[in-house]
Image: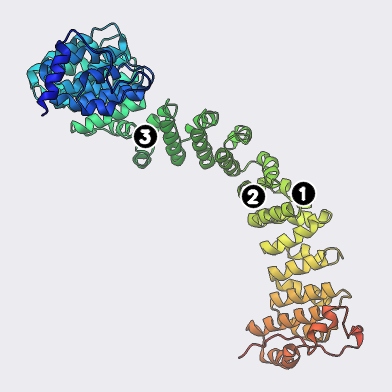
């Protein structure tokens, strides 16, 4: 220890002549706190504690005083106390904390001045004094001195300022555990009374203090605090009870504990037992509690929760609205449609996503128009969710969805076709009606979608559609995808059509169906002047050859065409089927090269 420096400190306090400045307190600019601390210049540090222009200087000065406090003689520390108590009026919170640290560093000599400061007229000083006493209670091993602070701190529990009551509760939580059992009774009784304080923060600190003190008599009041209106009080009470070794003895107490600790997974596992308490806290002031309770209620499928979910769609917090939309999605209740439609205008994108999914779960046709509107948007992620929602609506919405196949935007047409295809059998009869009664392109899409669905109820309507020149190719392709043998005779007739496109569609369909009757009709097409027709006929024959549905005679007929099927054009790049300006085969009627160029399967 530097005794010369300490003597200079004593001399400063004793001297009636105090210099107005030194080299570390410049006339202009902030004091050099580091230099003052290095020289143990207490006077300079106290002056720096009053420096108004920069709270950082004041904070560093208070911290420096705390750090050198152990080196100072007791009488010097006592003389510093009034200046530190005056500094508790500090507005800046970081400086305020540093001053409290400096006061607690003074140690035992500060106890009586701090007790006196609990009656100061300034609220900030009373709060700081209580907090400093609490910090002293952690490190001071002198219970007799700590006992002196108990009654004044109990009195501070009734202070008009809640910050003082809060600080007093915290201080008692630090001091009372250091006292003997007999001396802990009064703090416990008064902290229990604080569990009914009108300010949640005071109740929270009182619950935490009771947990620290460790008295069993606090258990019942803390159990009651598990139903407090404030989530932080409930959580602190639950943690205090765990510290005291308490375990729930009834399902109701267990639910209260899990809610207090916000253990939503455990609450879900408890099932309907947790529902009444969850319905209550679903309206809690804490957004995290509201969110968690709503999600659990949604997963549990509690009918009474629907009204709360609807109300929560208007919550100020986006996360709560998301949870409510998700819960309504799981509920899938039709009566919520109108509210969900309003929620489609929510400013939060995630809320809108979940609302769209919830609309699908309602299976209500009223949701179709707005969902189609979203499907037409340029926001791909929303369009995809809307498509899934329309699929979920299913039969109730299909009649309203089919007309959208005629939209001018091809992207919309394809999205609607995807929806109807995923609907499957629910869409078949309305699509048959559209095939028979709607104009292009709706009837064309209807034929294609019926083929993709593959329901045999569409076979005869599609066969009839073959007679419509605008639908022949679409209907033929659809019949091939369905694969029903009843379509073979009319498809065979189409192989003689004047249109190359129709012959190609019929050949492709016959190959997909795999009926042996098609072999003899397909072989002549291998000589067609149109390469695409030859190619489709060859593909169809090869499908039949590999299908294991042919007898040996039919297979030999196809095998006999192997050379024609495998032979490629020698002048393939300049053939009329790939027309170029330099084409040397301009008259395809006299072009005898009918090669196709497909590999023939090996046995």
Q: Quadrant of residue 359?
A: top right
- Horizontal side of 452 relative to 439 (left or right) equals left
The picture quadrant where one finds residue 295 is: top left
Q: Give x and y (percent) for residue 400.
A: 73, 45
Q: Quadrant of residue 122?
A: top left
* Label 1: element kind: helix
SS assignment at label 3: helix
Name which of mark 2 and mark 3 comes first in the sequence.
Answer: 3
Q: CA distance from mark 1 to mark 2?
A: 21 Å
Which of the numbered marks, if any, corresponds to residue 380? 2
Is disc 2 placed on a helix, strand or loop?
helix
Q: Residue at position x 26%, y 10% from top?
A: 158
- Disc number placed over residue 312 in the picture, else none: none
Which residue occupies the foreground of this view, 157 or 321?
A: 157
Residue annotated with mark 3: 274
Query: Crowding at label 3, few (<14), some or many (≥20) Cα neighbours within 10 Å?
Result: many
Q: Spot the residue most to the top.
A: 121
Q: From the image, which quarter does the N terminus lie in?
A: top left
Mark 1 = which residue? Answer: 403
Asked if residue 540 is positioned above or below residue 68 in the image, the reply reads below
Q: Nearer the viewer, mark 1 or mark 2?
A: 2
**Image x and y of residue 58, in percent:** 31, 21
Q: Is residue 228 visible?
A: no
**Residue density around tag 2, few if under 14, some if 14–19, many if 20 or more, within 10 Å:** few
Cβ–Cβ under 8 Å for marks 1 and 2: no
Horizontal and vertical percent for residue 250? 26, 32
């Amino acid at each position: 220890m530097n005794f010369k420096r300490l003597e200079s400190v004593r001399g400063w306090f004793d001297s009636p002549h105090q210099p107005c400045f030194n080299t570390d307190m410049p006339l202009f600019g902030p004091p050099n706190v580091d230099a003052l601390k290095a020289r143990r210049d207490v006077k300079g540090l106290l002056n720096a504690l009053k420096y108004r222009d920069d709270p950082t200087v004041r904070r560093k000065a208070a911290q420096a005083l705390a750090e050198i406090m152990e080196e100072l003689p007791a009488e010097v520390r006592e003389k510093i106390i009034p200046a530190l108590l005056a500094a508790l009026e500090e507005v800046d919170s970081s400086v305020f904390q540093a001053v409290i640290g400096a006061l607690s560093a003074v140690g035992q000599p500060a106890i009586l001045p701090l007790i006196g400061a609990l009656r100061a007229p300034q609220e900030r000083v009373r709060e700081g004094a209580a907090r400093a006493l609490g910090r002293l209670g952690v490190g001071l091993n002198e219970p007799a001195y700590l006992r002196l602070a108990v009654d004044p701190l109990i009195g501070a529990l009734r202070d008009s300022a809640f910050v003082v009551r809060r600080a007093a509760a915290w201080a008692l939580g630090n001091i009372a555990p250091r006292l003997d059992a007999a001396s802990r009774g009064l703090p416990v009784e008064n902290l229990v009374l604080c569990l009914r304080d009108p300010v949640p923060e005071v109740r929270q600190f009182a619950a935490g203090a009771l947990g620290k003190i460790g008295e069993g008599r606090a258990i019942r009041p803390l159990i009651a605090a598990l139903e407090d209106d404030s989530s932080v009080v409930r959580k602190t009470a639950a943690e205090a009870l765990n510290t005291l070794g308490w375990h729930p003895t009834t399902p109701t107490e267990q639910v209260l504990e899990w809610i207090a600790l916000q253990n939503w997974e455990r609450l879900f596992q408890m099932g309907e037992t947790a529902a009444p308490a969850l319905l209550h806290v679903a309206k809690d002031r804490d957004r995290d509690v509201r969110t968690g309770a709503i999600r659990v209620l949604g997963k549990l499928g509690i009918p009474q929760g629907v009204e709360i979910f609807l109300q929560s769609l208007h919550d100020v917090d986006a996360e709560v609205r998301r949870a409510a939309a998700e819960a309504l999605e799981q509920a899938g209740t039709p009566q919520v449609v109108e509210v969900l439609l309003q929620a489609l205008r929510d400013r939060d994108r995630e809320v809108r996503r979940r609302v769209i999914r919830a609309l699908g779960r309602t299976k209500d046709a009223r949701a179709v128009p707005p969902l189609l509107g979203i499907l037409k948007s340029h926001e791909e992620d929303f369009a995809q969710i809307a498509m899934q929602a329309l699929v979920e609506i299913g039969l109730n919405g299909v009649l309203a969805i089919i007309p959208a196949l005629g939209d001018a935007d091809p992207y919309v047409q394809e999205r609607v076709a995807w929806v109807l295809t995923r609907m499957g059998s629910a869409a078949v009869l309305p699509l048959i009606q559209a095939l028979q009664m709607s104009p292009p392109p709706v009837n064309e899409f209807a034929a294609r979608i019926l083929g993709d669905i593959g329901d045999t109820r569409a076979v005869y309507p599609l066969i009839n559609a073959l007679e419509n020149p605008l639908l022949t190719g679409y209907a033929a392709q659809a019949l091939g995808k369905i694969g029903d043998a009843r379509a073979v005779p009319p498809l065979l007739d189409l192989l003689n059509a004047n249109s190359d496109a129709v012959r190609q569609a019929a050949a492709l369909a016959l190959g997909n169906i795999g009926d042996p009757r098609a072999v003899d009709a397909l072989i002549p097409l291998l000589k067609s002047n149109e390469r695409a027709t030859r190619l489709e006929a060859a593909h169809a024959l090869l499908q039949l050859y590999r299908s294991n549905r042919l007898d040996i005679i039919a297979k030999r007929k196809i095998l006999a065409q192997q050379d024609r099927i495998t032979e490629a054009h020698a002048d393939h790049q300049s053939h009329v089927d790939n027309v170029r300006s330099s084409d040397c085969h301009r008259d395809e009627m006299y072009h005898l090269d009918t090669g196709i160029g497909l590999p023939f399967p090996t046995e």
